[in-house]
Image (cartoon, rainbow, N blue to C red):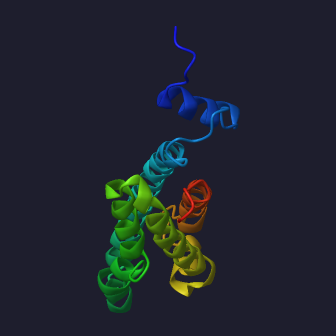
Amino acid sequence: MSGATSDAQKVWIERVLGVTPAGGEGDGGAAAFREAWAAAWDTWLDAIDTVDAQIDVLGRAMRATGDEGLQNIADNGLPTIFDGVRMPLVAAGMQISRATDAALAGGAADAQKAIAGFVRLLATDKKIAACDESDFGVSVSIRGTLGPALKKLADAVKRSPKQA
């Protein structure tokens, strides 16, 4: 058996044990970052799918009231709740997935900005608060679902290789 540690073994050691094996990071930490990002991105996709489904159910409940104002909100307000923050995060995720090791730091920086924007929206947007506190007999947990997923993405970004 060779004394060299394979890339897969290095990733496992770093992920499981939280240490970088002796001999440094030949790829500048790119493999460990990609693994952390992929896991966080999967969590994010599950979370946003859950929230989209909750918003859909809330919209149906609002439409069922027959109230014209609520129907308008369901048709025109709810679908735009994440406008301005969703696409930058999706774009950053795509950028990271396609980036060379040398370009990962730039993608991570874009992701960090997009994550921060989404976190700000969750903390300050009155529409999100209203959805989370809705009284339409449906369960909506935008902040409680997306917040932890965004935290996981932010934690993954902290592992990104540093820009040269």
- Measuring 46% from the left and 68% from the top, which residue is drawn there? 106
**Residue 10: quarter of image:** top right
Number of numbered callouts drawn: 0
**Residue 93: quarter of image:** bottom left
- Measuring 32% from the left and 90% from the top, which residue is drawn there? 68
Tell which of 8 and 71 is nearer to you: 8
Tell which of 137 and 128 is nearer to you: 128
- Measuring 41% from the left and 62% from the top, which residue is drawn there? 103
> In this rendering, would 130 be left or right of 89?
right
Tell me where residue 50 appears, x and y as whole percent.
43, 56
138 in relation to 42, above or below: below
Tell which of 83 and 157 is nearer to you: 157
Tell me where residue 146 appears, x and y as whole percent.
53, 62
Tell me where residue 30 appears, x and y as whole percent.
49, 48
Instruction: Tell which residue pokes out farthest to the bottom in this image.
Output: 69
> In this rendering, would 122 be left or right of 74?
right
Tell which of 108 and 49 is nearer to you: 108
- Measuring 61% from the left and 36% from the top, which residue is drawn there? 15
> In this rendering, would 133 be left or right of 51?
right
83 in relation to 164, above or below: below
> In this rendering, would 22 be left or right of 56?
right
